[in-house]
Amino acid sequence: MNYLIYLILGIIQGFTEPLPISSSGHIFLFKNIFNTNMFNDLNFEIVANFGSFLAILFIFRKDIIDLISSFFTYLFNKEKRPVNKSKFKYCLYLIVSTIPVGIVGVIFKDLIEEKFSNLYFLGFAFLITALMLFLIRNKKGTKEDYDITLKDAIIIGLFQMITIMPGISRSGTVLVACLLVGMKRSTALKYTFILYFPISVATMLLGVSDLIVAHTLSTLFIPYLIGFTASLIVTYFTYKWLSKLVQNGKLWKFSIYCICLAIFIFIYFR
């Protein structure tokens, strides 16, 4: 039974992480529907998130390597600075977009989770996500990767601040912000998921110490491995599916799903 449950949890994580429908919101919802301790296993959340992280890292491995290489080449090789300037600025903009949510997370995370971690707010959060996705349904934009400005990075960072609230999709919100500042769909998708790495790395580093000392790690190694593998594989293929939907301007379809989910929450938990 453990194997099956952790397999299902891994699939849920892998399916909801890339999509603009809030993976944390779904985990919180399933906790309340099934009322099982399996959904309160924070160590497994770290493991499953790591599976998603590796899948997305694999997809963007060439971009990540290129950006890191260009960043340090710009810093330490003056002769090659003109060639790497645009990529260096791109890296700086990623940092700028990360700072606001990092500050809010450190200062207000516990308070926000205490005040907003309830099912009725979760329902409204899904409605907010649905509205954002619907409003940008026809947005295309013209900006390429290196046309992004400091102003764009700040706006995206401010949008990302609200994703600390349960049920507000990070990928969906950042995608909306990227499209609003005029990015092409492919550019917006790339910026959204490369921006995922700083947040994800910070979250995993904060939780890895708890994972190392956890007494359950040895006894649940096989179930964790099953969930991790499921999360990794499902995240990879879900992202591929998402990229096609974004390119075809079908992102708004997730707004219908979020509305249906909100209605279900309001009726089921009334």
Image (cartoon, rainbow, N blue to C red):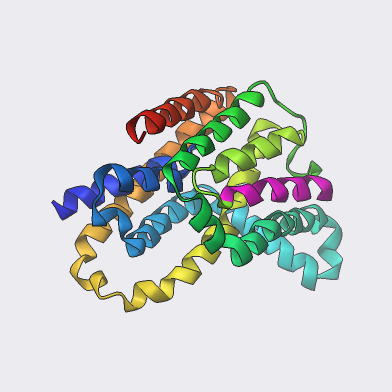
Name the residue nearer the viewer: 121 or 3. 121
State whether residue 20 appears in this view. Answer: no
Vertical arrangement, residue 68 with respect to residue 77, above or below: above
* Residue displayed at 70% across by 32% down: 184
In the image, farthest residue toward the left: 1
Look at the magenta stretch and give its main secondary structure.
helix
Which residues make up the magenta segment?
150-163
In this picture, residue 132 sits left or right of residue 21: right
> Looking at the picture, how far across and down is residue 147, in whole percent?
80, 42
Residue 135 inside the magenta-drawn segment: no
Determine which quarter of the picture holds residue 29: top left
In the image, residue 95 above or below residue 262: below
Q: Quadrant of residue 41?
A: bottom left
- Residue 108 position by quadrant: bottom right
Which residue appears at 17% of the width and 54% of the height?
Answer: 2
State the image coordinates of residue 174 (x, y, percent, origin top left).
63, 42
Q: Position of residue 106 (x, y in %)?
A: 60, 66
